[in-house]
Amino acid sequence: MKTKLIFIFVTIFGVLCSCLLFLSFINRPSTILPRSDFKNGVRRSADWLGPMSLDRKTAHGLKSVKNNPFASAIAQMDPKTCSYAPNSNIQLASSKTDFRLGDTISVEIQLFDAYKRRKNKGGDNVRVWMSEASKDARAAGVVTDNKDGTYTGTLKALWTGSPKIEAAIASRKENVDIFYRVYHDYYTLRNLSAMFESDGVQEETLCLPIPNIRGFENVCNLTAENYGLPWYCGKPSHRKLLCHDFTGLREPDKQPSPFTPHEAKFFEGHLLHQKLPTSVAIKVTSEQDTVPLPSVPCNKTPLRKSWEASTPIGFFYKNSWKSLTCKNTIPADSNIYKECLKNRRIWIHGDSSSRSWFNTLTERLGLTLVTEAWHHSKWHKPAVTMDTLRNITLLLVPHEYPFYHGYTFNKLAYNRATHAYLDDLPNNSRDIFLIHIYLHFNPFPPEVFRTHMKRIARSVKSLVARAPGVKVAIRGTHAFKGRGKIGFLDDCWMFVYDTIQREAFKGLENNVLFLNNIDLTVATENDDQHPNSLAVDSLISHFLGSVCEG
């Protein structure tokens, strides 16, 4: 009997210990979890390492995903059947090689795959341009997809000489299809995460512009913190952490790949931005050096024309931008610029390519930094430079989320929404507001960009109606060659986003200046994801020539 009682006591004691151990496990502080995917003592969700399974199938073995038409098609596709520039060609649409100044030139581009078979379907992002190195001359052309594997390039003879016409496959249809496969399953190509902190406990969760976040049954709606624009983050699992304990956002240092090994083959370096090996040589003659240029000053030209102008909107000649929409009558002189901008504030709103505008204008105007000293060149916080004598203020303000600051956590306050700044401007304001959002939206479906542009347009419409002294400019998308690695394409959204911008600002063309950056960056074969210095300097000059009354 005694032995039986001891056995019962030991059993009960063991069960109690087990329960206590289990309770301590589920309620333990995040900082002591011994998981290899926890960094700096921060708890991360079970799905933190990324999309490791899809409907219980590993990403490695994925062949098809329910309700995703792209997945099975891509899984069965041979990458060598995609368009391959080394086997493709460009030629004149006719046998004519001599042209007169102002003539229209047509070229035909035939794409082939890696097996040297003609492509019979369209969908690739093809671009065409002409240049003449001896004259530092460059111009962009227009490409029409004939839907049969051929593309028609249309250019204009803008200067006399012997230019050559070239083409490139900027991005292939199949790569964009892969993006849509990932959007369908995860909604993003690159993760952003939030930090929640309280009473010594920290937890990091994933964030998206939609509330459906893989790995989280419950989410925190941070839309209000993002100034009314959709933003959600996984709700922390620790009992001590609530949604209002959100403290910052960052781009995780370890980004899991949402692409299958088979999909990765479509992103091999030599397959991204493929320049055709052949080019077309022509001869252009005339008594003049260039086509006639406009005589109406840019600051007297109706703003609507900046939206209506089509390629080519201008060209480079002797490394100088020649606009075909208006004449820049404001000399590139810092004293003239300062006089024109006296007693005004200029807002540069956007991302890192907006930062280059901020730096260039700061240098041109001789302004002094009055906010926090920059600790590194990739500055993603608000900044202000000034000329106190002339009361000129230049402000750099990063746009709202989604925004990729880097690996360190940053306060959401650094990313005040565009419309919030616009709504705060008083009715007697004479501020100049330059808006640009683009690359930080590329990891998400274009619908996210559309939502933000429509919200900006709503505030712009209200502002120009109540504050007639304000000037608003939209800087459009630009061409670039990507990063040459999986997950990064060339400007596959360039024309898609351009269309979205035009749709959002429909009806505001008489009130807003549109700065078309496509022609400048295509013509200069812009390499980096940021516009090159020639394009930046040229567009800034055009911008100042348009807003300065002179």
Image (cartoon, rainbow, N blue to C red):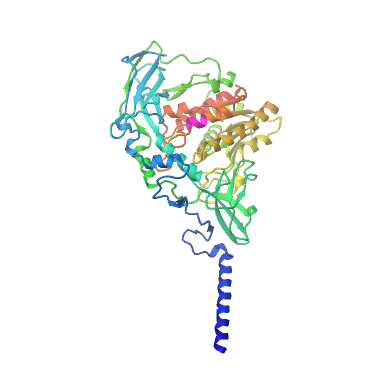
Vertical placement of residue 286 versus 236, above or below? above
> Is residue 228 depicted above or below 308 in this figure?
below
As rendered, which of 2 and 390 lies closer to the eye?
2
Q: Residue at x 38, y 41 (%)?
A: 267
Q: Nearer the viewer, residue 90 or 376?
A: 90
In screen coordinates, is 183 left or right of 61? Answer: right
Q: What stretch of residues is rendered in magenta?
A: 494-498
Q: Is residue 203 above or below residue 523?
A: below
Residue at image point 64% right, 30% down:
460
Residue 510 lies left or right of residue 131; in this view the side is right
- Secondary structure, magenta segment, majority class: helix
Residue at the limit of the structure toward the left, as seen here:
116
User: Residue 270: x and y, percent?
Assistant: 34, 38
Q: Residue at x 44, y 47 (%)?
A: 258
**In the image, is residue 496 part of the stretch drawn in magenta?**
yes
Report the front residue among 171 and 79: 79
Residue 324 is situated, as x and y percent measured from the top left of the image, at 49, 19
